[in-house]
Amino acid sequence: MANAPMEMEGSAKMPEGYAKLSSLMSTDSEFAIFRKFGALNAQNLLYYQAELMGLENDLRATASEDQNSGDPDKKDFAVNWYELSHAKPDKNYQFRKFMQVRRILREYNECLIQQATIAKIDRPSPYNLEMLRRWLDSSTKGKGFLVGLEEETWKEIHSHDFLAIPRPEKDVELDRLSKMFLGPLVEFYHTLVGRYYKKETGLDSCGNEIIRYNNRKLLRTADVVSAIASSALPIGSIIALNCISRVMIQLVVVAVFTMIFALMLTLMTNARRVETFAATSVFAAVQVVFVGSTNTNTYR
């Protein structure tokens, strides 16, 4: 991973406050965490919905009134768009009402689509959110520049209302094990071991010394762990069953290894419930066949 260039002597100093925070978010996109204002967006949609219901009722009443008015200029409004849209100014109330409905409906639909898009954006990881809070409170980085109501922006009280802008290079969704390696496991490793020997890899765009861990290496490590676990579990099950002669204990071992397999499948992958059920059933069946074959050979 390339290091950020050192700030050249005489160049403009990065301003404090929001300018420095935005620079951090642009450099380290995992800190691009924002509030989605879910309650306000929902309230906005509710108001649009209520307004449209009133407009719909007015439009239906106007259309019915025009149709039953006996006015020859209005009798074809319901079946002839040209007549409706080219009505005289003193008779085009229905048309003007529909144009109002069209404008509000367009705004309402745009808000619906925006909300649907926002709902698909992932929440930030607790680790990244905590790191952002520490940066904001740090005396050498964010310097606690937020004051008043803005000081509560990233506080715990809004923990349900955050979203994280996804990285452009994120083409596929990471499985649970990969997310653990990129989040809490990195924090645990750095606290326990990494901080004692891993040096700063340079400066971010704000001039702060930072330590970076290579995501590709972390994901490769997750792949290795997953490969070892996926091979060790069935091998361990076979060895354990081969060392036990009593059928009842063998069945207990089968049950234990099957539960471990299902648990690992749930915690380490993005498998759906039906896929977990199917894979677990196959794993259990293989073990039962092995138990049956070993016991048949024993009694011969």
Image: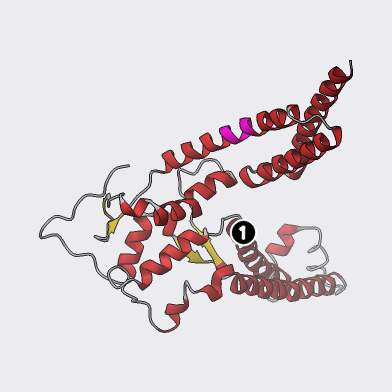
Q: What is the x, y in percent for residue 14?
A: 23, 65
Q: Which quadrant: the N terminus?
A: top left
Look at the image and name its color scheme: secondary structure
Question: Is residue 21 or residue 116 the one in the foreground?
Answer: 21
Q: In this orientation, does residue 91 appear?
A: no
Amino acid type of disc 1?
Ala
Q: Which residue is the extreme one toward the top? A: 300
Q: Is residue 289 left or right of residue 37?
A: right
Q: Is residue 282 left or right of residue 186?
A: right
Q: What is the x, y in percent for residue 298?
A: 85, 20
Q: What is the x, y in percent for residue 72?
A: 82, 68
Specify the quadrant of the image occupied by residue 12: bottom left
Question: Is residue 71 or residue 275 the one in the foreground?
Answer: 275
In this picture, is 46 found above or below 80?
A: below
From the image, tell me which residue sits under label 1: 119
Question: Which SS does the magenta portion mostly show?
Answer: helix
Question: Is residue 5 or residue 72 the one in the foreground?
Answer: 5
Secondary structure beneath dot 1 equals: helix
Rendered residue at 48%/60% (across/down): 127
Q: Is residue 87 left or right of residue 115?
A: right
Q: How many marks?
A: 1
Q: What is the x, y in percent for residue 63?
A: 80, 70
The local crowd at label 1, few if under 14, some if 14 to 19, many if 20 or more residues have their Cα within 10 Å, is few
Specify the quadrant of the image occupied by residue 136: bottom left
Instruction: Write down the region rendered in magenta.
Output: 227-232
In this picture, is 108 found above or below 294?
A: below
Rendered residue at 72%/42% (across/down): 262
Q: In this orientation, does residue 209 appear?
A: yes
